[in-house]
Image (cartoon, rainbow, N blue to C red):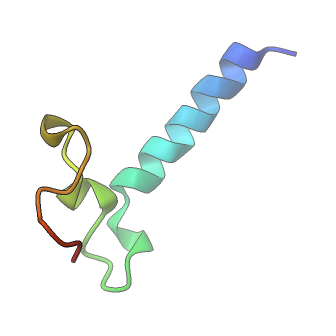
Amino acid sequence: MNTKGLEKAEFAIGELAFNDPSLSVSGKVSCASCHSPVSGFSAPNALAV
């Protein structure tokens, strides 16, 4: 079994979900809206929105 290909596919699906605003209630906010790579993918707020 080609596990490298599977890992790439899983990464790609995760990246799509992380950046997809249509998964939010409003359809306007994705995980990437708050969780920036600049901040280590953590939300910069003291409390989550």
State the image coordinates of residue 7 (x, y, percent, origin top left): 64, 25
Q: Quadrant of residue 26?
A: bottom left
- Indicate whether 47 appears above or below 1: below
- Indicate whether 26 appears above or below 45: below
Q: Quadrant of residue 29?
A: bottom left
State the image coordinates of residue 21 (x, y, percent, origin top left): 33, 67
- Residue 38 or 9: which is nearer the viewer? 38
Q: Residue at x 20, y 57 (%)?
A: 43
Q: Residue at x 43, y 43 (%)?
A: 15
Left or right of 22 in this view: 43: left
Q: Please identify the residue farthest to the front as the structure is shown.
A: 46
| Quarter occupied by the C terminus | bottom left
Left or right of 18 in this view: 33: left
Q: Residue at x 20, y 59 (%)?
A: 33
State the image coordinates of residue 23 (x, y, percent, origin top left): 44, 71
- Indicate whether 38 appears above or below 3: below
